[in-house]
Structures are given as structure tokens and as C-alpha cells.
Amino acid sequence: MSNSTPPVSGALSGKALNIPDVNVDVLTGGAVVNGAHDERFTPQQPPTGLYPDVRSFGRRFGLLIPATNTIMEHELWSLLVANSEAAGVDGVGLHTTPVITPRPDISTPQGIAEFRAGFLSGLEAAVQTAALGRPQYMIMGLSLEHILFGLDPIRETMAAIQRLSDLSWATWHDAVQAALGLLGAKRIGILTPFEAGGNASATQMFNDMGIEVVASVGLTATDLRHIAHLPDEAKEQAVVEVLATRSNRLDAVVQCGTGMSMLNVIDRLEARTGVPIVAINPTTLWYALRENGFGLPLHGAGRLLREF
């Protein structure tokens, strides 16, 4: 059972975070050598008397993603590994639980509705499964604006999900709102793997935040499993030729869709266009880290993670 600790405040949200102490006394039973009890394997106890997770000793994050998503966990681990020592994130662990999404066809409104129902119904089981690993903080790995219309339904849905556990969560809508606020961004372009309806729903979420969506590009993946295969060249072309143009006068380009990778192109696009690229996976990780007190710069994912 997790030990209770005093609440801490999220550095970005100011909300009280419940971060349980998951350290344990692992050697109370001693060791057995060739069937006999042996005292040699009882090391000196830490000052607290409890031992940390030898890998996830800094923070144990639970990550929930659709079972079809092959991108988000890879991108988050890439950033953590690349920045482990310089950014002080050595000891931060990701522990992923897939949410079963049996209908990956999102080519029609009916397909999206079926995906929405399947994902939301699978969340409770996924949260219960994730809890077995005793995470200290949760990350929601889905663009809820693709399946829910408007900011209020997104917040209401996440509030219901959060009630399934006693942990705090990093969500895309909270992360991107914090990111755009720090960047002073009011005019954005959005890049998504969605179709027209999904882009309209994403636009509504940003409008509800007081953000103007000046231009949008949806690369229209018709199957959730295909999103990971969208080529970097198409993303770069969309940003350079349609979104971050001089006439649009954007404050930021925002990429939605956790199954779509942007990590290879963020730094290159920012250097070329001069416009910050706020990509969902790095930004959600940035939010989770900053909320939990990891404040040093992270490199390899653009201005937001380096400067804020």
C-alpha cells in the first residue's frame, strides 16, 4: 500500500497533487540461499527505512494510450533518455497501459462514434490495470478533442476518469493551454491526423480556450493504425506551405493526435519558420514533468521544452 505524503502544488496548475510514496521495505523476510535463511543479503537501510524503485526512483508515471498507438510511449522515452542527466529526469519512469480500442476505423462519423464508445468504456479497466503498478501520477495519452466536441465535455469526461483513481493527471487540454499561455500564443495553426470533423472539434476546443485557429491541416488517416505511418515530409510541407506562412502571422503551430509523431521535425521546423511548434506528445510530457517539480530544460523537442 502507498504511504501518504503531504500534498504538493503543481508548478503550472497550482492544483494540489496527490503523489503517494511508493517506497517499500523489500527485505523484511530476508533471503534464502540453497533453501536456508541467510542474513548476508540485508543491506543497510535508507534513512527512511524504505527502499525506492531502483529504476523509477524519481517519479513513476502511469501512461494510458489506445492499444493502437505505437508512437507516444516511444517519443516520451526518447526525450527522457536523451535528457536523463542534464535535465534531471534520470529516475523518471513510464509505465504504459493500453486501452482496448477494437474498432480502429475512423473514416466515417459512425466509425469515430464507435471508437469513442470503445475507448471510454475501456478506460475503467485500463485505470484499474495501471493501478497494479502503483503509479504516482497519470498521463492521458489521447487527444480527447477528436472524440468530444468542446472544452466542457472534455473536462467533464476527464473529471469522471480522475474519480476512478486518487491520482492527479496530465492531459493534453491542460498542457496545451498552459503551453500557449507561456508562449503568449493567441493565433495558432493546427496540424492533425484527423478528418474535417475532427479538425472542427479540435478548433472548437481551442476557441473555447480563447485561442483563434487561423488555419488547419488534417492528414486524414482513416485507420488509427495508419497514423504512425504519416511521413515527416507531409508534416513539414503542411507547416511550411499552409500553416506557418507570413500571411497567417501565427504565434504557434499546434499538433494534435498522440499517434502522430513530430519529434523528428520540431527543431528543424522552428529554425526554418521562426514559429514555435507545440506537439502533443512532448508538450504533455513537459506538463507532467513541470507539474511534478522537474524544471530543467529538455532538448530535442523545440522552444517550449527548452525555455519554459
Image: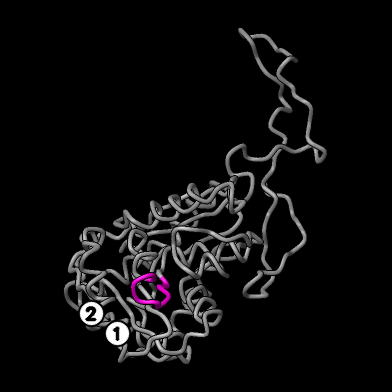
Image vertical order of residue 205 relative to residue 283, above or below: below
- The range drawn in magenta is 270-278
Q: Is residue 302 shown to the viewer in this render?
A: yes
Nearest to the observer: residue 28 or residue 59: 59
Q: How is the image coloured?
A: one colour
Residue 245's disc is 1
Nearest to the observer: residue 57 or residue 190: 190
**Kind of element beneath mark 2:** helix
Quick one: label 1, few (<14), some, or many (20+) residues within 10 Å?
some
- Residue 245 lies, in percent from the top left, at 29, 84
- Residue 124 lies, in percent from the top left, at 45, 61
Q: Are marks 2 and 1 in contact (CB under 8 Å)?
A: yes
Quick one: label 2, few (<14), some, or many (20+) residues within 10 Å?
few
Residue 220's disc is none
Nearest to the observer: residue 308 or residue 145: 308
**Furthest residue to the right?**
47
Can you tell which quarter of the image residue 148 is in?
bottom left
Can you tell which quarter of the image residue 71 is in?
bottom left
Can you tell which quarter of the image residue 227 is in?
bottom left
**Kind of element beneath mark 1:** loop
- What is the C-alpha distance between the residues marked 2 and 1? 7 Å
- Residue 87 lies, in percent from the top left, at 59, 54
108 relative to 63 in the view: left or right: left
Image vertical order of residue 293 relative to residue 3, above or below: below
Pointer 2 residue:
241
Q: Amino acid at mark 1?
A: Thr
Image quadrant in which the C terminus is located: bottom right
